[in-house]
Image (tube, helix red, strand yellow):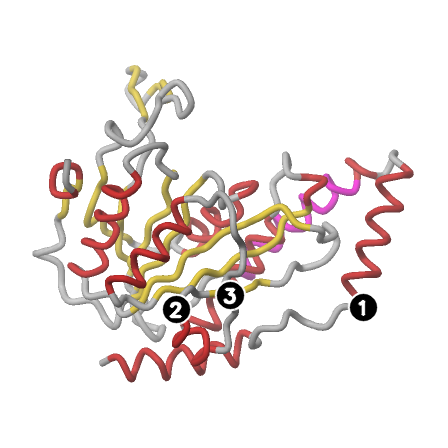
């Protein structure tokens, strides 16, 4: 099986994109509470998008673990919804560039072929870089805006942008494998990840999603509508407080995390503004 067997591509007839960056988030290992996939979906929820590719789910999933869903359509007819990995483009005439986006589901098997599909899309649409989003359980309090940490496995890119190089060793997800593949193909790739309070991972965390959206707006130079998520942040802040208010031990732990968070300096990576300037300069030099 090769990528052409499972990737349906339809971008030949679209108008050229403006300095596109490929933005990727996959529900699964690297998307606790769906904070990363929610960021991509929020970013384009009021924008016209065009689907330019679709990856057939059948070869990539164990459907006893990622089950299809039955639903009733507008005509009250039963339909099946399978795990979707659709690639679409969004144009940002008021921003610095257009985006190619994938907010999908991490495959269970045949990772190499799945990543071949991603690489084919990035190259076919002439993306200047790839940015993957992730969310991990972390020791961050739910009452604070969590920092966004950037990294890349490319030593030159890490040095140029002031990003960290991952030192982690152990099991990884498809995003980690994808980063290595893009390195080998020469495509610049950056990973941005945000923390989610590890004691509330069964809840939603729009505050973590908002942190990613704000960072993306600075780095990519496109509007992400991050201010519109404030109502969700406030609503979930109340629910989070209610979840811990009757547990004295958890409350004490949260206060300790708050103190640690407030004492720590900002993450040892560039600010959003600094990283945006360096990223823009780097992309210009790729032309």
Real-space CA distance between mark 1 and mark 3, rounded to the nearest whole angstrom? 21 Å
Q: Residue 29 appears at what percent x and percent y?
A: 49, 40
Foreground mark, 3 or 2? 2
Camera-side residue of 206 and 125: 125
Foreground mark, 2 or 1? 2
The residue tagged 2 is: 154
Dot 2 crowding, Cα within 10 Å, few <14, some 14–19, many 20+ = many
Relative to 45, say whether 113 is above or below. above
Specify the segment rendered in magenta.
226-241
The residue tagged 3 is: 150
Assess whether mark 3 and mark 1 are in contact (beta carbons under 8 angstroms).
no
Dot 1 crowding, Cα within 10 Å, few <14, some 14–19, many 20+ = few
Left or right side of 262 for 146:
left
Real-space CA distance between mark 3 and mark 2, rounded to the nearest whole angstrom? 12 Å
The residue tagged 1 is: 263
Q: Residue 52 appears at what percent x and percent y?
A: 19, 50
Q: Residue at x 81, y 68 (%)?
A: 263
Relative to 49, say whether 199 is above or below. above
Is residue 228 one of those drawn in magenta? yes
Is residue 197 one of those drawn in magenta? no
| Secondary structure of the residue carrying numbered label 3 | strand
């Amino acid at each position: 099986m090769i990528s052409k067997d499972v990737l349906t591509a339809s971008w030949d007839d679209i108008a050229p994109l403006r300095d596109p960056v490929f933005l990727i988030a996959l529900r699964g290992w690297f998307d606790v509470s769906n904070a990363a996939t929610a960021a991509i979906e929020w970013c384009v929820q009021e924008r016209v998008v065009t689907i330019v590719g679709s990856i057939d789910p059948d070869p990539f999933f164990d459907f006893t673990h990622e089950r299809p869903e039955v639903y009733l359509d507008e005509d009250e007819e039963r339909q099946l919804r399978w795990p979707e990995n659709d690639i679409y483009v969004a144009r940002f005439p008021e921003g610095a560039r257009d985006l190619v986006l994938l907010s999908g589901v991490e495959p269970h098997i045949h990772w190499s072929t799945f990543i071949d599909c991603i690489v084919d899309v990035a190259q076919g649409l002439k993306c200047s870089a790839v940015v993957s989003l992730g969310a991990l359980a972390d020791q961050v309090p739910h009452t604070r805006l969590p920092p966004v940490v950037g990294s890349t496995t490319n030593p030159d890119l890490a040095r140029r942008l002031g990003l960290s190089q991952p030192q982690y060793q152990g099991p990884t997800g498809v995003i980690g494998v994808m980063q290595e593949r893009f390195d080998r193909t020469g495509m610049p790739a950056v990973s941005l990840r945000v923390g989610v309070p590890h004691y509330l991972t069964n809840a939603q965390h729009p505050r973590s999603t908002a942190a990613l959206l704000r960072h993306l707006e600075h780095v990519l130079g496109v509007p992400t509508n991050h201010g519109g998520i404030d109502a969700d942040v406030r609503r979930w802040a109340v629910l989070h407080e209610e979840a811990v208010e009757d547990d004295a031990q958890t409350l004490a732990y949260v206060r300790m995390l708050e103190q640690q968070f407030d004492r720590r300096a900002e993450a040892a990576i560039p600010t959003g503004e600094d990283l945006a300037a360096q990223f823009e300069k780097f992309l210009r030099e790729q032309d």
